[in-house]
Image (cartoon, grey):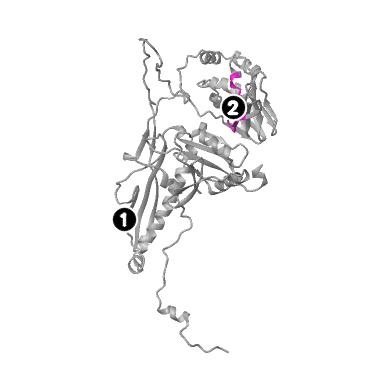
Amino acid sequence: MTEQQFSLATTAARNLATTTKSVPQMQNITSRWLLKLLPWVQASGGAYRVNRRLTYTVGDGVVTFVIEGSNVRVIPQELGELPPLRGYEDEEVLRALAGRFTQREYAPGETIAEAGQPVDQVFLIAHGKVNEIGAGEYGGEAVLGVRGDGRYFGHTALLDEQGHWEHTYRALTPCTVLALSTDEFRQVRENAESLRDHLAQTSDGSEPARNEYGEAAIELASGHEGEPVLPGTFVDYELAPREYELSVAQTVLRVHTRVADLYNKPMDQVEQQLRLTIEALRERQEHELINNRDFGLLANADLRQRVPTRSGPPTPDDMDELLTLVWKEPAFFLAHPRAIAAFGRECSRRGLYPDTVDMGGHKIPAWRGVPIYPCNKIPVSATRTSSILLMRTGEAAQGVVGLHQTGIPDEYQPGLSVRFMGIDERAIISYLVSAYYSAAILVPDALGVLDSVEVAHGDGAAA
């Protein structure tokens, strides 16, 4: 039996009410901290040239391998990354050397080279992590560094200098290593006059003096008395400096004239369509600034500015190691939210509570006073590893800068234009939406990357 109704029902009343509406929402809009924090530099002419001092350091210091199943071979030309062979180009001899490397497997904890023993082999790390261990200040062992894929040690074995290992090298994870003994090297050297000449030139110190960054040293005199003859010097520049051309993200936004004419109250349809389209373009822009092969920060970070984690998850020790790479005015860390959570777990495990900094009302976690901003554009691999970036920013600090060009035709936002393309025979209005951008690392030590950051939660990640 239906109960008697004494007042107007809400379902009927809604026919006379005005519905309050939100603007269209979109889930993939993020805080985009990188776009907010990068200083943006005007790139007139669509390009930005990074002039640097001439450097004599050739290559990236990392050896590349060919992997065929369980077999690993070094690419012959990559042997030029070893300091004694730098600049040597005889491919036949390099192939002979590459063919004499033997593959070895080491389990975690196994010693590859023992301190005090003769340096009679050069080792190339094809896969895995190796601890460099030396004596601590008070007699105990200290981990002096971690070497990962593509790194090497023992290259002095290629010279006639008879030395001993100063440090012990011990496998931290399962390692695949290629080794070349001095006996094998000598056999190739005896049959290659060009190699003998190259090694003689390398060992006689005929190369120009360099500073720790590979730049030609500027000759100076200090602390002198009287009237000595002062050294003469000059600063040379790279002859072919790198140029960054502005990249573009574009789309064509289409709106039917009937929609634009009739359905504009209380919200403008074209405005809302354009707002969401621009949000998507800005998200793509941040993704490209991190991942693009040509100018993205992850792909263009100097390999000497990359370090692996010591144990897997990001620990306070790893973050400190990253700070040693970018110690000149570090601006901020950038990490995937999962990596930030993994770092928080490691801090909690040690009883540490990182500080926070206030950024426009947002409480941002910080380490050593340097804020850690989240960015979901940093990739997480299928094995749940990611990277953490630390950078110095701005032209004045020789840091990382964003590139754009303002004042372009039909500019809607800085570096972004919305251009009317017309109305077609279907009565559809078209707008060309374009965002122009790029990024530049002014000097290599402006950006450091912590690689192989495990973000998985569990006992395996904490081991």
Tell me what residue is drawn at x 45 percent, y 81 percent.
Answer: 12
Residue type highlighted by circle 1: Phe
Indicate which label's residue lies in the foreground, 2 or 1. 2
Is the Cβ of the residue at disc 2 closer than 8 Å to that at disc 1? no
SS state under label 2: strand
Residue displayed at 31% across by 39% down: 45
Residue 376 image offset from top left, x and y in percent: 51, 49
Q: Residues within 10 Å of mark 1 (few under 14, many from 20)?
A: some
Q: Dot 1 corresponds to which residue?
A: 420
* Residue 25 can be seen, yes or no: yes
Identify which amino acid the numbered label 2 is placed on: Tyr
Marking on residue 331? none
Q: In this rendering, would 223 be left or right of 451?
A: left
Residue that carries the numbered disc 2 in the rendered image: 152
Nearer to us in this view, 329 or 394: 329
Q: Quadrant of the C terminus?
A: top right
Q: Is residue 154 above or below residue 283?
A: above
Which segment did they paint magenta?
143-156
Q: Quadrant of residue 222?
A: top left
